[in-house]
Amino acid sequence: MSGTAARTLLDTAFGDGARLTALLDARNTTTCDSKPWLHYVALVPRGWDGHSGPPVLSDSPPVILESNTDFHRWTWDRARVRLTLCAGELPKVLGQLHLQAHEVWWVHALDADSVGMSIKALASLCQPGASVHTTPSWAALADWHAAGFAQLEPSAPEQAQALPDHGQVAGLAATLSRLTFAPAWPVRRSRQAHRVNVHRPARCVVVGAGVSGAAIADAMARRAWAVTVVEADTQAAQGGSGVPAALIAPLPSADDNPATRLTRHGLRWMRQTLHSLSASGLLHQGLDWEASGVTRVLETGERQWQADGLWLRPAALVRAWLAHPQIRFCGGYQVARISRQDACWQLDGEDGRPLAQAELVVFANALGCQKVLFPADMEPRAASALSMLRAAYGTVSLGLTGGLAHVPAAPVNGAGSLIPALPGPRHAETRRWLVGADFSAQPLPIAQAHAANLHRMQALAPDMLAAWHDEAANQLPDALAHWQGQRCISHDRMPLVGPLLPAPDASLWVSAGMGARGMAWAGVCAEWLASRISGEPWPLARDLARHMDSQRSRTFIRDKT
């Protein structure tokens, strides 16, 4: 929030969202520019379906929180409210939250086996002075005092319906008891070890204008930061983000591993982002992206339909993100050195010319950060992880779809991916198919890469490939076009997102190592990074975030490249 006040409300009985609806109605009727942002964090049952939620969510793509500790976030800029819904059983979800609540609505059934544990977990999520509104039966429990809560006089019925500065909130019992978190012992913990506290105008430099960098720039600009994006190329969306189109699809696994969970979060976040940018006229559905669904081909040959899958043009998405009025793009700026000057960082070019200066710097330029950052100055685990970033190369092949027969109705994904009828930037242009991509330690010769991609196409859409080969024009050497680029991968194939310096210094951050899933992961990783910088509730469960943290302990997977 770049120094602006914000308040956090935790609601353990979201129900049909009546309290949220009343709150949004109240804040929408007043000028909210001077009001603090409100972070509304609510618990819902596993399997929660957005169709049963409040009407305000009907304008967003449908969401189902199907797993325990499955989180999702919505934002209403006019009302200055961010809603984060968290699915699962109360004790388990409380342990996965990362927040400091100012207000708590604690209304749910008593469970004798978990009462004490739940109250203790709640205490770890409350700021000193936080108010807890609950039922008399809950307030009568002795566990509150042991956890540091003190009971206040019961609220009058008319007072029980109001939250200070947040409007009228309906839907609770007529008579409530109120407690406050006022422990007799000093609270030494810091639930926001890394946080930037600066006054406006707060400046942020993002190094790199690919999908990761543009997502971070947008997330910070929406939090009132003045953002400068520095890019070595003269145009944005180069490098791995320059691929003509990308497919985003669920990544199922038997154990619901961290990559699967992050892809699920990222796909939901991306669908919501694409709809929002299209509503504002910055993207065009059908040209820049399409909620097409994806057919997944298993190793057994079985085909499964994934309705949530979509394709998009990364360059169009990057341009839409960078269009925010708080963002300034500087192309052709190669960062060679970074140095600290009082409270600011200065970035210099290869000729020593100053390029930018800011209180906060985020590196999102993939392997390029290794050439600028000095491990000796970084937190040891972050330095180690950064040093192990490496490149993986990929090539996609493109051909004319034209009047081909047997073209799949939707993209196909498996050992490679196929977008069968990618439209041109304008409706009148001929559609093309796109297939790829390898994941190799060195760039493949183009002829070899084309052969490998056609082999993938044989597995994904054999009838379409046969029809394409039947066209005489497709036997010519120039029948296939290509794109070739590199991705940045980490030691364990999970992204590196977070601070680079030891706590409490939070002025230098990184977002890298997205690998082949950058289009799915970049948006939700940017939202998590911006939430950490701003001291907001996290949009991800703590156990998932631990696998993405730039300062996580090192773990390894078997190298398959």
Image (tube, rainbow, N blue to C red):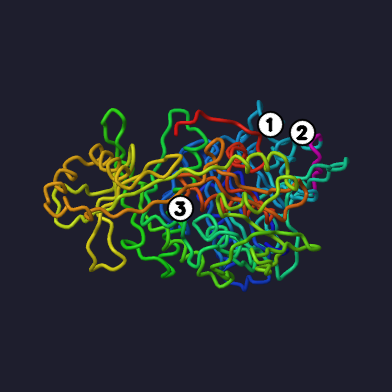
Mark 2 sits on what residue?
A: 143
How far apart are the alpha carbons under marks 2 and 3? 54 Å
Mark 3 sits on what residue?
A: 240
In which quadrant of the rendered image does the N terminus lie?
bottom right
Residue drawn 64% across the image and 38% down it:
94
Instruction: Give the residue type that dot 2 points to.
Output: Asp
Residue drawn 68% across the image and 59% down it:
337
Mark 1 sits on what residue?
A: 115
Residue segment shown in magenta: 146-152
Tell me where residue 206 sits by quadrant.
bottom right
Question: Which comes before the other along the chain, label 2 or label 3?
Answer: 2
Q: Position of residue 190 (x, y in %)?
A: 78, 45
Q: Position of residue 383 (x, y in %)?
A: 68, 43
Query: Camera-side residue: 526 or 451?
Result: 451
In which quadrant of the rendered image does the C terminus lie?
top left
Residue drawn 25% across the image and 37% down it:
459
Instruction: Give the residue type that dot 3 points to.
Output: Gly
Mark 1 residue crowding within 10 angstroms, few (<14) / some (14–19) / many (20+): some
For residue 385, side relative to residue 190 (left or right): left
Q: Is residue 101 above or below residue 167?
A: above
